[in-house]
Image: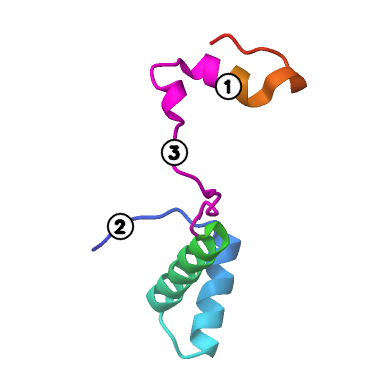
Amino acid sequence: MKTTIDIPEPLLRRAKALAQRQNRTLRDMVEAGLRRELSDTQASLGQFRLRDASVQGNGLSPSLHGSSFSEILDLSYGDRGPSTKL
């Protein structure tokens, strides 16, 4: 695919000179640079994985069925923290 990009003249001159010394085309250098940038960026971003923080248990206690989230939260923290009324 053809596209047009604006490259500062000093950078273009240096790139053309390097391409000539390496017996490569400017197109090849641009492609290689884009591939490297995309690869480096993808590697640095990585893929986020949430650690498994599950606990042993059998789910919600039958006595709490029908309770609101706020009620369950208040029971789980007891007097260790402020009451959260959502």
- Give the colouring mode of the picture: rainbow
Q: Nearer the viewer, mark 3 or mark 1?
A: 3
Element on which disc 1 rests: helix
User: Looking at the picture, does residue 17 appear above or below residue 8?
Assistant: below
Residue at image coords 51%, 54%: 48
Element on which disc 2 rests: loop
Q: Position of residue 19 (x, y in %)?
A: 50, 82
Residue at image coords 46%, 91%: 23
Name the residue tied to disc 2.
3
Q: Which of marks 3 and 2 is nearer the N terminus?
A: 2
Q: Are marks 2 and 1 in contact (CB under 8 Å)?
A: no
The outermost residue toward the right is 80
Magenta-colored span: 47-73
Find out whether residue 72 is within the magenta segment: yes
Q: How far apart are marks 3 and 1 (CA)?
A: 15 Å
- Identified by mark 1, the residue type is Leu
The outermost residue toward the top is 85
Q: Distance between the residues labelled 3 and 2?
A: 57 Å
User: Looking at the picture, does residue 21 appear above or below residue 2?
Assistant: below
- Identified by mark 3, the residue type is Gly
Residue at image coords 53%, 11%: 86
Mark 2: give few (<14), some (14-19) or many (20+) Cα within 10 Å: few
Mark 1: give few (<14), some (14-19) or many (20+) Cα within 10 Å: some
Q: Which of marks 2 and 1 is nearer the N terminus?
A: 2
- Identified by mark 2, the residue type is Thr
The disc label shown at residue 73, or none: 1
Q: Where is residue 42 in the image (x, y as percent from the top left)?
A: 49, 62
User: Looking at the picture, does residue 44 appear above or below residue 28?
Assistant: above
Name the residue tied to disc 3.
59
Residue at image coords 61%, 20%: 75
